[in-house]
Image (spheres, coloured by chain):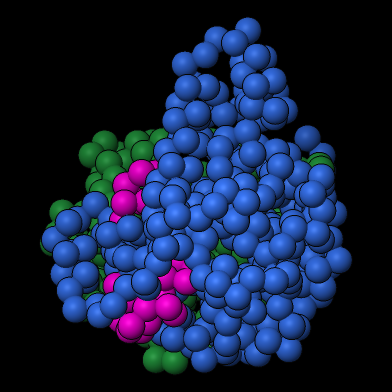
Amino acid sequence: MTESTSAEQFGSSRVKRGLAEMLKGGVIMDVVTAAQARIAEDAGAVAVMALERVPADIRSQGGVARMSDPDLIDSIIAEVNIPVMAKARIGHFVEAQILEVLGVDYIDESEVLSPADYTNHIDKWNFTIPFVCGATNLGEALRRINEGAAMIRSKGEAGTGDVSEATKHIRTINGEIKRLTSMSRDELYVAAKELQAPYELVAEIAATGKLPVVLFTAGGVATPADAAMMMQLGADGVFVGSGIFKSGNPEQRAAAIVKAVTFYDDAKVIADVSRGLGEAMVGINVSDIAEPHRLATRGW
Amino acid sequence: MTILSSVGTRPAETAIPAGLRVGVLALQGDFREHAQVLRELGAEVDLVRRPEELDRIDGLVIPGGESSVMDKLARTFGLADPLKAAIAGGLPVYGTCAGLIMLADTILDGMNGQQSLGGLDIAVRRNAFGSQTASFETDLDVPALGELPVHAVFIRAPVVETVGPRATALAVLDDGRCVAVQQGNLLGTSFHPEITGEYRFHQYFLQKLVAAAR
């Protein structure tokens, strides 16, 4: 043990992962303007995700989706007091450098934007700011954690309002974790090989029965019931993208989803908050989206 | 990374009286980490989300999280007034970070209409260090807990800007800013012992506040 010192340490794993710990049991909402950020904060969002277009619009309008204009991000940071997250393209470390100097609180290296590198993700250890990354399975989650991600979100299929992929991904990740906990050490070496993940992380999860970082879920959550289902399936919290501001009554729906996440195991509360919310986002069935147009397959 | 002092410091003998029942406010935030520490120290733990769940607890922890969200949910679900009444009636409460903000009589830089439960004669500035890149960990002297420094993690943390005459500062940063306070049955810290394996604050809370008040 070293002599104690009062030196302050910034950007350590504990500090990065710690912010995600504080977001647990909360809802992180996609916003594209300062006015939407205001609505989200007033409705009880635990953080906002600043981006230029919500996934439903990226999907319908097509084209290359990139990091937001710094002016937009500045205006959202100025509007709210809760943490502000923003998206960088997969592998685009310069977008991440920009977001860090803008003073956002968390970077989402996101498959919702067009990837900038089809081989490598960002080396997230190089940054003081923490990163959240998407994953469809445990191996992908562990590769991201190995690269320095301080928070994981299951991907789902963003911009659809169809929760089925989110269900699949959270069930897959938690199922694979459970499987590891029942393995002997010789089996864990093979598991690490099959998961394409570092043995040390695999062994740690086999011992603890959980990821070393917070696990939220995302992609297709559109109703309070969707959000509560993700929590009952073991998510620590929920990202809602297009589901709020593509619905008929964003204020009320946002507040209802916040309440449903806190009382995720109380069907009576979830029933009450589900009343009279107006139209949910129209949505699109994931099965109707051709494989090359699915966002969840981005990331390696 | 060389770390330092008290990480992982567990008391060899906790000497917590049997049967203490402590609630952890579970509206949002890292309430499971608090519950875990309290259970390891020998307390019974109830997660509290409804007013009637306050009735049978001997003490309460308000966790880290987003104070404005806790405030909204506490008011919406009818928990704020019973909580204020319980605090006024002497219920021991320990708040970390957002929990400290909830216990402050005055919030500086709060949201539109943000309210606290109050009880601590202090003014707390929300998010006093800036964005997440300014979050940090450091060693902190806390004389009330003994000589070994506390390893403290500050995450978008508040500071106690004014300590009123009824409250006592328990720890200050090198620059003099107050980050831990006590006033009778109420204890508050800007930082998060629950995520560093630091058990002494919870032990102090259970022994000196909860057990003493029962």
Q: Which residues are magenta?
A: A228-256
Residue A278 image point, x, y percent: 25, 80
Q: Residue at x 65, y 57 (%)?
A: A111
Please give the name of the residue rendered at 19% of the width and 78% of the height, measured from the top-left corner.
A276
The residue shown at (78%, 35%) is A1
Answer whether residue A247 is magenta in the image: yes
Which colour denotes chain B? green
Tell me residue A179's x, y (percent). Answer: 47, 22
Q: Colour of chain A?
A: blue
Residue A151: image location, x then y, percent: 60, 51
**Is B183 rendered above or below residue A138?**
below
Residue B91 is a magenta residue: no
Image quadrant holding the C terminus of chain A, namely: top right
**Can the viewer see residue B10 in this picture?**
yes
Q: Is residue B63 above or below residue B103?
A: above
Tell me residue A91's x, y (percent): 80, 55
Residue A17 visible in rendering: no
Say left or right for B53 vs A108: left
Q: Is the residue B123 above or below the residue A164 in the image?
A: below
Q: Nearer the viewer, residue B142 or A30?
A: A30
**Image quadrant where residue B104 sits:** bottom left
